[in-house]
Amino acid sequence: MIDREMSCGVLVVGSGGAGLRAACAAAEAGASVLLATKGRVNRSGATLLAGANVSADVMCDGGSLWRMGIKSADPNDTQERWFSDIVHEGFYLNRRELVRQYVEQAPARVSELLQDGAVQTSAEEGGRQIGIPGSAILDVLWRRVRAAGVRVLQDVTLCDLLPDGSGAAAGALLLDIPSGELIAVKSGAVVLATGGMHGCYAFNSGTSGLCGEGQAAAMRLGADMTLMEMVTFCPDVICAPRRFRGNILPYILQCIGYGSLKNRLDEDFLPRYYSDSAIRLALGSEWNKLLLSYAMFREAQAGRCDEYGGVRYTLAGLTAAQRAELEETLPQLSRGIYRDIMALHDRQGWLSVSAAGHYFDGGIAVNADMSSSVPGLFAAGECTGGLFGANRVAAATTQMLVQGAAAGGSAAKYARDAGARNADPAALERACADALAPLYAAGGGSPRKVRAKVIEAVSQSAGIVRSAQGMAEGLRLLDETEETAAAPQRRERAANREWLDALETRSLRACGRAILLSSLARGESRGVFVRSDCPATDNDRFLCETLLHGGEVTLRPVEQGAPAAAPGKADYFEELERVFARLSYAEGDAANG
Amino acid sequence: MRGDGRRRYEAEYRVPRAPGLSVMDVLDYIYENLDPTLAYFSHEACRQTACGRCLVRVNGTVCLACGCPAEGERLTLEPWNANVVRDLLCRFPPAE
Ligand SMILES: Cc1cc2nc3c(=O)[nH]c(=O)nc-3n(C[C@H](O)[C@H](O)[C@H](O)COP(=O)(O)OP(=O)(O)OC[C@H]3O[C@@H](n4cnc5c(N)ncnc54)[C@H](O)[C@@H]3O)c2cc1C
Ligand code: FES
């Protein structure tokens, strides 16, 4: 059933920032590296779209940034302060060893990015961050990957991870999308860097290939997952017209201080939900994701959204001088697709925006060496979980760089010790049969329709606000889709999108289930996770991660310490305000930012 | 223009007009509603003119399907190079 066999020391799957950084780390540590990726090696994943590919924030503590010569950085900021903020921001669910690593390694990763020639944008990024377009980050990393002599496979998709006889990861089964060939790769270690589960949500901000296939394959191999219920939505994402749907430009403009939001009735709706200090955070810091998404959800429920389900983002309040300043800061706005979006905005006076599935705080459970619970399997970047706990405010770009570098190094070491091993033949046979199964299915509807049903079920039941009843229904609908007969109309392997849809659907369903099961186990509201039927944050019972293994969720206490959560159970919004008050930047940067 | 490298044929589809559609949206409409066997670049698409992968010849001019507005009564869509895998999906040069 296999068309091709390959072998390597370290197999890296995915070529966003985490995958590229892992590939060069492993190669520089002496491993023979194969990098397999679904799209174009230097132009794919969320990394490409980071900061709308206009200006992505890359973070590091202000003191270190200052020493790198970044004059807008806060020289008085320290790693300890940043650590403490990240734990508060994460509502005390962060895996602290990952936060420590993130904070400590960030300066090295950011300074090498700058030394390797990543061009900064002139967007005013504030005390702990600089701005770099997503593609510029990829360019720098790709140059380094090439120099390190990494072999690359593009346009292949991960079907399954392959265990050796002892259950350790020893390679993967890949599908070459254009030719339809199945490739068995045998390796000493595997690094998963396949990014988020954006495809689970009908409205999302990611590229089309981000379907949680790494997470799903890891689950099938028996890896532990953590905090799968934590999903961050991005509030100001264009929802119409279709041509611009999913673009986060308004969000990026808002992050650097431009634009305002009104509902269909032309009302400022934030005061309905938040105190003045929370509104300042909502408009002036990356807390905007959590705060604005929730408010937009409520506006939609109350029928105060437009016919596209969006609220209105507008630059109409800017003076001519401010508008000129914006265009000078971001010259990309006068070119290509952004010129078209700005022209639409100027014609209408607004853009219709709404909250889209954007960042996945949960994922494969990893330790600070990026090892998962399965020997030989490492993971980095957005497909992992735990670093940011219940809410990410700090940069995911920095996460992918720090974790990528760590994963590549650890995998190279593991592979050197373990050597390339053969996959268990029965497991390989099963993986091939599973991959080919859709082509031989008896028939029925279109895989595309089944996929749409899966996405609808997850979007409806695992959105910004959830309830036990809705989630039970979501799980039921997901089960139903598994029973639905479907097969591609064309049965050939080459360039068969319906086949790919069927394969992706399997992963989307598995991830959707994982999100729902973990959500049901968390009987509270915390950070980005809000339940209408459990509206309190409960620090007595839920300072725990949801650990998912083999379809079962257990609650495991998360290491605490300084800073510590306030004990007791509090109303979700009271707890929000309590956390705000503890941030180092509470009424400083955020109020002016 | 459909088919693989050897056999080529023309196919015609009727797609409802709507404001704000790109050529990629038109292809998605065909795939989702009219012909699920249509091949074009879609497996890791940014849809924001950032990946440069969705090249297609629109009325004779090569452009990015996701960035090109779908305008006019009739669109003629062809592969952008001669190295056709199937339909509008062309082989990309290896990573360099
Ligand atoms: C629109 C947008 C804007 C953002 N802006 C910012 C920002 O300004 N600042 C910030 O800090 N963070 C931002 N984020 C988040 C951040 O960009 C991501 O968390 C980060 O880039 C993830 O990097 P990664 O390498 O882990 O995954 P990705 O960059 O998503 O890469 C995943 C890789 O895996 C590949 N892949 C997926 N499935 C498969 C498969 N089955 N087989 C083979 N390969 C596969 C993909 O093609 C891709 O190459 C943004 C995210 C989005 C979507
Ligand atoms: S899909 Fe990326 S450029 Fe069109």
Image (cartoon, coloured by chain):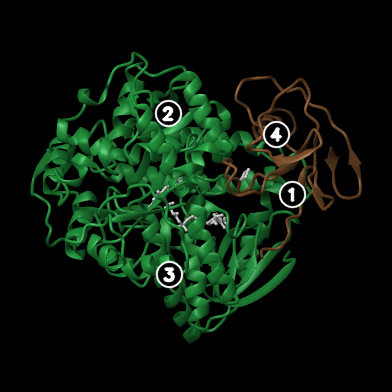
Asked if residue A162 can be seen in this view, the reply is: no
Tell me which amino acid carries mark 2.
Answer: Val
**Residue at 19 percent of width and 49 percent of height:** A542
Q: Do the residues labelled 1 and 4 touch (CB within 8 Å)?
A: no
Measured from the top left, where is residue A455 in percent x and y? 51, 36
Q: Considering only vertical position in the picture, is A81 above or below B25?
A: below
The C terminus of chain A lies in quadrant:
top left
Give the chain of mark 1: A
Q: Is residue A150 above or below residue A395?
A: below
Residue situated furthest left in the rendering:
A567
Which SS class for mark 4? helix
What label does residue B27 carry, if any? 4
Q: Which of B60 and B1 is in front in this view?
A: B60
Q: Dot 2 surroundings within 10 Å: few (below 14), some, or many (20 or more)? A: many
Q: Residue at x 22, y 39 (%)?
A: A281
Expressed as whole percent of the image width and height from the top left, the position of residue A127 reads 25, 54
Q: Mark 2 points at which residue?
A: A353
Identify which amino acid the numbered label 4 is placed on.
Answer: Leu
Chain bearing tag 3 is A
What number of labels is visible?
4
Q: Does the residue labelled 4 lie within 8 Å of ligand 2?
A: no
When the figure is inspected, residue A444 is found, relative to residue A174, above or below; the finding is: above
Mark 3 Cα-neighbour bin, 10 Å: few <14, some 14–19, many ≥20: few
Query: What hue does chain B carry in this figure?
Result: brown
Q: Quadrant of residue A460?
A: top left
At label 1, the amino acid type is: Ala
Q: Read off the residue under disc 1.
A: A495
Q: Which amino acid does label 3 sit on?
A: Gln
In this view, the residue farthest toward the front is: A321
Query: Taking A589 as reference, is A483 left or right?
Result: right
Q: Earlier in the sequence, mark 1 or mark 2?
A: 2
Nearest to the observer: residue A443 or residue B54: B54
